[in-house]
Image (cartoon, coloured by chain):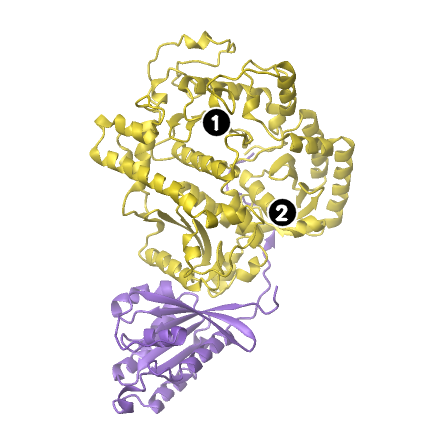
Chain colours: A purple, B yellow
Amino acid sequence: MASRRRMLLKVIILGDSGVGKTSLMNQYVNRKFSNQYKATIGADFLTKEVQFDDRLFTLQIWDTAGQERFQSLGVAFYRGADCCVLVHDVNVMKSFDNLNNWREEFLIQASPSDPENFPFVVLGNKVDVDGGNSRVVSEKKAKAWCASKGNIPYFETSAKEGFNVDAAFECIARNALKNEPEEEIYLPETIDVASGGRPQRSTGCEC
Amino acid sequence: MDSVSSSSSLDDSTQLSPNSDSKAVDQRFDLLSVTDEPIQSEPSHRGNGDGFTNGSLNPERSTGDEDDDQLGVEDQELVADEGPSSPNSCSYACERGSSSATSVSRIDAASDIDDIEIREVRNESSFEGISDSQPSSGVPGKHRVDEDDASISWRKRKKHFFILSNSGKPIYSRYGDEHKLAGFSATLQAIISFMENGGDRVKLVKAGKHQVVFVVKGPIYLVCISCNEEPFESLKGQLELIYGQMILILTKSINRSFEKNPKFDMTHLLGGTDDVFSSLIHSFSWNPATFLHAYTCLPLAYATRQAAGAILQDVADSGVLFAILMCKHKVISLVGAQKASLHPDDILLLSNFVMSSESFRTSESFSPICLPRYNPLAFLHAYVHFLDVDTYLMLLTTSSDAFYHLKDCRIRIETVLLKSNVRSEVQRSLLDGGIRVEDLHVAPLPQSGPSPHQVQQILQTDSPERPREPFVGIGGPAGLWHFIYRSIYLDQYVSSEFSPPLNNHQQQKRLYRAYLRLYASMHDKGIGPYKTQFKRDENYVLLCWVTQDFELYAAFDPLADKAEAIKTCNRVCQWLKDVENEIFLHGASPFSW
């Protein structure tokens, strides 16, 4: 067996509906972009293999639906995530304001062991729109919020033009990896007949 | 008897079933099966007719359970309508022929099934190149790692098995690379978790020919996708065994790892065990132990098995928990320490693990293993040594430093086995094979009970030109092709060897599936339990007979005569009684279950 085995990282993408979560994922995985908006129902699942530092990773990307009616799916979807990506549209203030809700909701539902240090990445998407003229969330403002939440890495992206998408996902993978706990030795107990404790049996029959 | 429709729904859980095939199946069995209602039938004159002297034919059914050792010929309810006397008549056609009292929907349902079966047959031939018998008949192991859920070949596989964690991380897939199937795995988790969120549990989804069966074991999810027409209960049982195999390798401590860290990726803990799972999955299509929950013994003379048992007992008294001597998947002898008993499923999973792990064959080994039915929470230590390519000894202990002691035990056992000719007898039994339907003699056998190969010799010398019934042509008497007999008290079964016309893998697999359906219908908690079932279709006459002491499953030529078939089943039971000391392991210390 290879000493450095392949790793699988579960990545959840969250954010208001219409900020471009599915487009970002499509750009990253399939190098495709469509201007047509199709709402995600429940969640989409994509797989992407990446390699860096001579290691092979599989990103299992959970592209969730932004509509509120799907929020009940939370617990089921967030469990065991290695990284959470928060996406907002730099042209819509509300989508930025909601990042806080998304983050808190995720931490409640996923209840990671170390919430303070759980790896998030924030993406400000659609920086290409109208040549930046309709932009309402400044880079400075976004970075300030990220800094206040434990230095969350921040990327400005354009799913349409593929700008910064790869860099963002590489950072996502690295962050997910950083949080990986030290490998513990798997050491189950051994049956101890001598100490009086009779081994438990699935059927209660006394033979 | 018409109340079956309610029993086919799965209790407190959700069954997503757009077209309720399962209901139709239930109803079909219902029509073909025997009720427990006491019936009044005339004492048969046939009972005395053919020199069958020990009175095993008794047409009167007793109302109690105890005296059910005889199968009555005249028992009307035993038999489904055989319908028109056309030789091509199958059970479905018969059902339609006799359906004047049944509803229209039932007829529709029955013809539905008919269609599916026909499609299935066509399917088997057209996809032969990738039917799952093909790769598994070769070396077991991971098949087609280059496939993923986008490949056509992957989608055409008839039976998939998946293990994943409750966070959707793949752990095992029968076909394809687990990492490439990460998206598929996530979808499965989303479905299961979505139902869980609603306080519900998904057990089965039907989509056309495909059944998707789910089993949840704490943080571990197991899923089977099959289009093989196997009963839901069989598929569920197979997933339980796969889980058991995983527990055997890792114990239930994996649950703790998931509690500590939901992100836990356990694939690496199962590194190198692909062959173990492949071989177990392969056994679902040939090994009756996987659905009977019983083990089988290598046929051996009583004294030979006693000799093997004695030395194992000797060793067990020196602090070994279980001492098991096996040949392939058959038990030669086994012994447990005081108060320790071994479940047949544990024997199955342990022998599968040992036989499919190449490293056990190269040297003596000492390995932690867990017996899921004995104690799923903790490891035992197994000393494993192959005496030859097929025969292996397993000594199980609780002590992690017992290697040298067990090695000494093994040397002692090996010496005794050699001296007492057990090894050579085992080789001989292997060459002779098991019980054959052709050897079922028409006349009663001597009570002394010769071993199967001796029976064969007797038959060959006594009546070298033994006349067969004219209409049989092939197989045993009365068109008997195959049987499985399970002793309930012993937790053991014996299965006859496959012989013509069941001489190719495809036919054997088809019969095996027919047994699976028969078994499931006999043990259906909703509509059963039944005592007898007679079913004729285009492939076989299937006869099943369940008493307090045993279960008999027999397959005959589809044209076999009903009364003759029933008589033959009686004869099989008598025959097995005569040779039981050779085919079963008796009095294996405190081995009750």
Chain ID of residue with mark 2: B
Q: Tell me, for residue A185, which label it has, or none.
A: none
| Image coords of residue B87 (percent x, y) | 36, 24
**Eyeballing the image, is B71 above or below A206?**
above
The total number of labels drawn is 2
Screen quadrant of the C terminus of chain A? top right
**Residue A101 appears left or right of A194:** left
Question: Which residue: 26% across, 71% down?
Answer: A38
Q: Position of residue B587 (x, y in %)?
A: 62, 28
Q: Where residue A117 sits in the image (x, y, percent)?
A: 46, 77
Q: Is residue B50 above or below residue B182?
A: above
On the question of residue B67 being in view, the answer is no
Q: Are marks 1 and 2 on the same chain?
A: yes
Q: Residues within 10 Å of mark 2 (few under 14, many from 20)?
A: many
Q: Which quadrant holds residue B451?
A: top right
Q: Secondary structure at mark 1?
A: strand
As shown in the figure, which amino acid type bears the numbered disc 1? Leu
- Whichever of labels 1 and 2 marks the residue nearer the N terminus, that label is 2
Amino acid type, residue under disc 2 in the picture: Val
Give coordinates of residue B297: x percent, y percent.
60, 32
**Mark 1 sits on what residue?**
B552
* Quadrant of the image occupied by residue B120: top left
Disc 2, SS: helix
**Residue B354 marker:** 2
Query: Could you give the CA–CA distance between mark 1 and mark 2, rounded to whole angstroms?
Result: 30 Å
- For disc 1, the chain is B
**Residue A53 falls left or right of residue B3:** right
At a point 33% along the width and 58% down the height, the residue shown is: B194
Which class describes the residues within 10 Å of circle 1: few (<14), some (14-19), or many (20+)? many
